[in-house]
Amino acid sequence: MRIITANLNGIRSADSKGFFTWLTRQQADFVCVQELKAQDGDLTAHMRVPDGYQGYFHHAEKKGYSGVGIYARKPPREVIVGLGLPEIDSEGRYLELVYDELSVISLYLPSGSSGENRQAAKFHFMALFYPRLADMMRDGRQRVICGDWNIAHTEKDLKNWKSNQKNSGFLPEERAWMSQVQNELGWRDVYRGLYPEASEDGYTWWSNRGQARANNVGWRIDYQLATPVLAARAQQASIYKDQWFSDHAPLTVDYADA
């Protein structure tokens, strides 16, 4: 089973850069996307139904903002749109496809980099989402949460960690929360489980400022967090950098079939 996650920084922009041509060549079972920056009426036919896939979406109410989606080869038993929390769901940040023994989730955790209000919104999301993560772990269903978590967990997960300790995405509170999600609740960071020491090879986002991408001054903020049984089936992971569809790079994980 192959699962891909990719922040598109605008689905129409990514499309113009060849994302869907690339997607249909990947032989993935699921492709989770974030930051659509589009409403339902903005999507073309091949954005909704790329060759071999059906797309499912949770759009933000605000135009040109946020939004998540999942492309799947097989129809799910159920589609869960949002968390049932109006202040969060209005921003289009959570989508879950439910199958008999597996749930695949596309998540876009808020960024706090634009100011104090958005950082407060990020902390609010984290506080509300944590008990949901606990509930998901308790019910025994196998799940993978793919997406842009907007948190670099450890010093290995960004190039300039010393100078970013007071910046959103690497704040002590954010890192502690991610540690709790993994160490206390039991979610597994699939990439880190496969490559415990990998640092610069694991970056998935680069600032558009300066020469960050050329110099690989990046952050690892796109994750696949999975329940333990599913995470143990992970065989390999890769980050695609041969083409650029966004300021993020797609993360692909291959899992052994159950």
Image: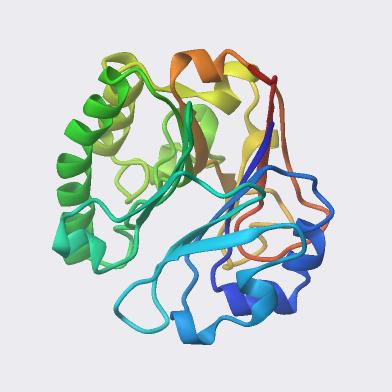
The residue located at (32%, 15%) in the rendering is 183
Task: Determine whether 69 is above or below 144 in the image.
Answer: below
User: Going by the image, does 148 lie left or right of 80?
Assistant: right
In the rendered image, residue 127, in percent from the top left (x then y), is placed at: 15, 41
In the rendered image, residue 56, in percent from the top left (x then y), is placed at: 50, 61
Q: Is residue 46 visible?
A: yes
Residue placed most toward the observer, 150 or 7: 7
Q: Is residue 196 visible?
A: no
Q: Quadrant of the C terminus?
A: top right
In the rendered image, residue 205, in percent from the top left (x then y), is placed at: 57, 52
Residue placed most toward the observer, 75 or 1: 75
The residue located at (39%, 23%) in the rendering is 141
Task: Choose top left, top right, bottom left or bottom right for residue 238.
Answer: top right
The residue located at (62%, 42%) in the rendering is 203
Task: Determine whether 180 is above or below 88 in the image.
Answer: above
In the rendered image, residue 92, in percent from the top left (x then y), is placed at: 34, 64
The residue located at (59%, 27%) in the rendering is 191
Residue placed most toward the observer, 35 or 221: 35
User: Going by the image, does 18 lie left or right of 252?
Assistant: right
Task: Determine whether 145 is above or below 78 in the image.
Answer: above
Q: Quadrant of the N terminus?
A: top right
Total residue callouts: 0
User: Going by the image, does 38 lie left or right of 109?
Assistant: right
Residue placed most toward the observer, 94 or 158: 94
Q: How are the residues colored?
A: rainbow
